[in-house]
Image (spheres, rainbow, N blue to C red):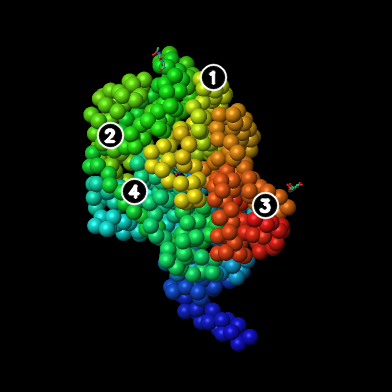
Amino acid sequence: MKSLNFSVMLSIFLIVSCSSSYALSDVSTSSSNGKLYECICQNSDYCVPFSTAFVTPTNDSFNTILQSTAQNLRCLLPSVTKPQLIFTPMTESHVQAAVICSKQLGLQLRVRSGGHDYEGLSYMSDMESPFIILDLSKLRDIVVNTVDNYAWAQAGATVGEVYYRISEKSKTHGFPAGLCTSLGIGGHITGGAYGTMMRKYGLGVDNVVDARIVDANGRILDRQSMGEDLFWAIRGGGGASFGIILSWKLKLVPVPSIVTVFTVPKTLDQNATNILYKWQQVAADKLDEDLFIRVIINVAADKKGEKTIQTAYNSMFLGRADRLLQIMNDVFPELGLTHKDCTEMSWIKSIMYIAGYPSNTPPEVLLQGKSLFKNYFKAKSDFVKEPIPIDGLEGLWKRLMEEDSPLVIWNPYGGMMAKISESETPFPHRKGIIYMIQYLTLWNDPSKESATKHYDWIRRLYNYMTPYVSMFPREAYVNYRDLDIGMNKNESSSFIEASVWGNKYYKDNFNRLVKVKTKVDPENFFLHEQSIPTLPITMKGKSVNHFEM
Ligand SMILES: Cc1cc2nc3c(=O)[nH]c(=O)nc-3n(C[C@H](O)[C@H](O)[C@H](O)COP(=O)(O)OP(=O)(O)OC[C@H]3O[C@@H](n4cnc5c(N)ncnc54)[C@H](O)[C@@H]3O)c2cc1C
Ligand SMILES: *[C@@H]1O[C@H](CO)[C@@H](O)[C@H](O)[C@H]1NC(C)=O
Ligand SMILES: *[C@@H]1O[C@H](CO)[C@@H](O)[C@H](O)[C@H]1NC(C)=O
Ligand SMILES: *[C@@H]1O[C@H](CO)[C@@H](O)[C@H](O)[C@H]1NC(C)=O
């Protein structure tokens, strides 16, 4: 009782001390938001005025802020449940307070760094209790040290900003993470993080050496204080299951001062099918680790203006054009690469090239952290272990031709990816994988019919691909989150479904992730549609199933 009185008094004191800017009108619409504000004020080092860090649906800026980094328009439709509040922390202690207070008030917390989640899980929720968004966009400091070869990057920074800050200090240092520059480093690294240097240096997670997180009790932990089990789990075990990443310590890797890029398109009348068949045989195993050639497949018009399949070979090579041409002539002459196709440039320019910026865009644009495009989309992923035969490819072409705006991206593995064991990090797709497929369908029409049509198409395509891709389990990339493969929503089937997506995303590592989760977050505070479940399986702290490992 005594402590209760004390905390009530303290909160009154804090409200009064913030009162000059504490606009009651803003929060009176929802007493829950008022209580949250008081609690956060009380539990953090720095009590900001309500209007600078808290936005409720009644504020005119609410939609702008909600939409700011949200990448999938499908998850912003009016029919989608909106948060009760968006809180943009200014300090690490605000993040701690957000955990403590949402727990106290029974609110669900959604954490957003770069907003690129494929199913919008960082800014929407289909689960029952009201939710708030913790938007880390103001925590984006980056410190680069090229003497000791590391960078500390706060979660809200984009990968483009990280790359820029590294290149600002040195032309011969880089970091191997995503190709799209608007990804948030916070969420991106939690699932793996692949990019053009993965065949040489592995994934983002393979190059993380420390992290600062806020755990389910609101404590700040680093690698030493969290211990190796939890440090293992956060490097690939998926976002928002174990804690909130405040910052990552990244190990920088060497890059040459000049690299080479090319993009060579081949349509069906240019022998695309045979050339792709050959790519499958060389891309992972036979090509030099300095070379990354992905294939971007879509429907385009050929020279006669007729609909065709286009396969574009989009590449970055850690070296100069002469050596690249030698390698290509030896191993993959079918592509017919010439000097004319190749452009030499600095590593940071290659980042912009691969991300799709028009040439001559100054790298400073990366500091804006903006994405180049947004649309409605649905995606899925697969991993391939044996080349797909010609007739399999032809069946794929037929299906792509039936869709309005399909996009399929093939991403080569091998090299370093095959040298790291499956259990080194929770990301298990390593040796034996020759490439990863990402299927996307994009659209611009907000209607439900339109979404249904595109969902149907991609599900049929996924079904068609079954015989050609990994099985037992059919593996999937957690950063290409796909709610089709099981949800935590249905309490009675939650564990069965969790083990379905768990095995696809993590293979045998799923068991260890469940154990770590049970130890560090037994009440299952960090909960979302595909968060790692605890043992026994609980929903919001309520036991629904007893499962023995
Ligand atoms: C256009 C586009 C291009 C992409 N390109 C690549 C690519 O080249 N390589 C690749 O590997 N992936 C790529 N991805 C996938 C990308 O890695 C994932 O979508 C990733 O989760 C994005 O991280 P984010 O911080 O931007 O997203 P968010 O939506 O903010 O977060 C994603 C998930 O992580 C959680 N989360 C966010 N921040 C934190 C935090 N600080 N601590 C704990 N959990 C957190 C969220 O709650 C959510 O569940 C791409 C995605 C898109 C949309
Ligand atoms: C709405 O939110 C914005 C951005 O946080 C803030 O500047 C503004 O003061 C808020 N408006 C009201 C009426 O509280
Ligand atoms: C198409 O590619 C195949 C296999 O690489 C090759 O044998 C064939 O000669 C090529 N055909 C044409 C017309 O270039
Ligand atoms: C939940 O899952 C159980 C078991 O799979 C199933 O019988 C039930 O119909 C599901 N309920 C809903 C609402 O989907």
Q: Residues within 10 Å of mark 3 (few under 14, many from 20)?
A: many
Q: Which residue is mark 3?
A: 495
Is 192 left, or right, of 518 in this rendering? Answer: left
Q: Position of residue 212 (x, y in %)?
A: 42, 63
Three-letter residue code for mark 3: Phe
Q: State the separation of the CA atoms marked 4 and 1.
A: 39 Å
Give the mark, 1 or 3, whose residue is nearer the N terminus.
1
Q: CA distance from mark 3 to mark 4?
A: 37 Å
Name the element at disc 3.
helix
Is residue 111 found left or right of 210 in the rendered image? Answer: right
| Mark nearer the N terminus (3 vs 4) | 4
Q: Residue at x 35, y 31 (%)?
A: 287
Q: Which residue is mark 2?
A: 260
Q: CA distance from mark 2 to mark 4?
A: 17 Å
Mark 2 or mark 1: whose residue is earlier in sequence:
2
Which mark, by number, is residue 499? none
Q: Disc 1 and disc 3: Cα gap in Å?
A: 38 Å
Identify the residue position indicated by label 1 in the image: 391
Which residue is found at the position 43% from the left and 27% from the top? 281
Q: Is residue 329 visible?
A: yes
Tell me residue 518's x, y (percent).
59, 62
Q: Nearer the viewer, residue 400 or 81?
A: 400
- In the rendered image, which residue does mark 4 sit on? 175
Q: What amino acid is labelled 1 in the image? A: Asp
Q: Is residue 443 left or right of residue 208?
A: right
Q: Nearer the viewer, residue 424 or 255?
A: 424
Circle 4: residue type? Phe
